[in-house]
Image (cartoon, helix red, strand yellow):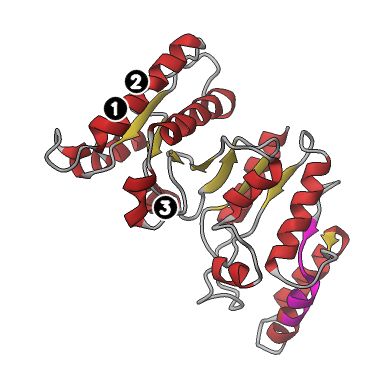
Amino acid sequence: RPGDRVVADLAPLRALADQLAARPGGDWAERGLAALGPLLDPAPRPPGQVSALVRGVDLVLEDPRGRALVTAPIDKAACRAEGFPFPGHTEYLAARAGVDDFAMLMVGPRLRVVLATIHLPLREVPLRLDVACIVRAGRLLARALRERFTDPSARPVIGVLGLNPHAGERGMLGDEEQTIVGPAIAALREWAAANAEPVSFRGPLPADTAFPAHADGALDGIIAMYHDQGLAPFKLLHMHDGVNMTLGLPFVRTSPDHGTARDIAGRGVADPASMFAAVALARGAAR
């Protein structure tokens, strides 16, 4: 569409297109590269995945209210090798935008899942999980549901998961539901009442039953305590049509809900549906 731009490092794209052209049926890459030509912004920095990301953020920050950023998956290890000090896109974008309240929201036709903690080793989750991060995620999700994903007259219902199996089984399997998650839910309810936010919070809920309830429509969104608690069930339903959306930024940012799939890269067999969904959501949200 007019105004669209594709930020990429041209040299690797050209090398890949040339490599694929030598294979039977590999001319699709050359045709794709030619189609990108009028839109291509070749990231005027040394080659590398990080340079394209930096350039894309530069462009969207020029006019954050009128533009949206759609990012492709990144190889986190390769980015770290180039000196990228962030564990993922989300943390980098928040730093560039200068915001402290941000969250990773996974959006699909049936599920909407926000994460209280994001890219942490599992052993660190109970040490880093606190009331503040759950409340931050809950506020951002409540506003996103009201503004973008539910009927304006609706009262969204958000499920807050427990950290432990069976939501702690009343303390038998852990006490974080009593010491962290429960107080966070109480704080979210107080916030909603004080700000006349038409949203309700339920929990702490066991993850294994909350997701079926959400998929059946009993919940409008879920707050997961850690990365795989939320993303594993989400991708079971939405591997091909799910979108990762960053909440709390001054601009719209989306991306596919999957990684780089290095094992099939360059073979022409990857499914682009999630990227198409990310672009569609970004366009709609930016408007």
Find the residue positioned furthest to the front.
127
| Residue 235: assigned label | 3
Amino acid type, residue under disc 2 in the picture:
Ala
Q: Is residue 97 magenta?
A: no
Badges 1 and 2: C-beta atoms under 8 Å apart?
yes
The residue carrying pointer 2 sits among few (fewer than 14), some (14 to 19) or many (20 or more) residues within 10 Å by Cα, namely: some
Magenta residue span: 6-15
Q: Quadrant of residue 15?
A: bottom right
Which of these two is toward me, 168 or 183? Answer: 183
> Measuring 52% from the left and 70% from the top, which residue is drawn there?
261
Q: How far across and how far down the image is residue 206, in percent?
A: 24, 38
Amino acid type, residue under disc 3 in the picture:
Lys
Q: How far across and how far down the image is residue 226, in percent?
A: 38, 47
The residue carrying pointer 1 sits among few (fewer than 14), some (14 to 19) or many (20 or more) residues within 10 Å by Cα, namely: some
Amino acid type, residue under disc 1 in the picture:
Gly
Q: Where does label 1 land, which residue?
A: 182
Q: Where does label 2 land, which residue?
A: 186
Decide if residue 219 is on the left or right side of residue 245.
left
> Measuring 60% from the left and 74% from the top, which residue is drawn there?
268
Q: CA distance from mark 1 to mark 3?
A: 27 Å
- Tell us which disc is closer to us: 1 or 3: 1
Q: Quadrant of residue 26?
A: bottom right
Q: Sequence-wise, which precedes: disc 3 or disc 2?
A: 2
From this view, report whether residue 82 is shown above or below residue 85: below
- Tell us which disc is closer to us: 3 or 2: 2
| Residue 263: assigned label | none
Question: Is disc 1 placed on a helix, strand or loop?
Answer: helix
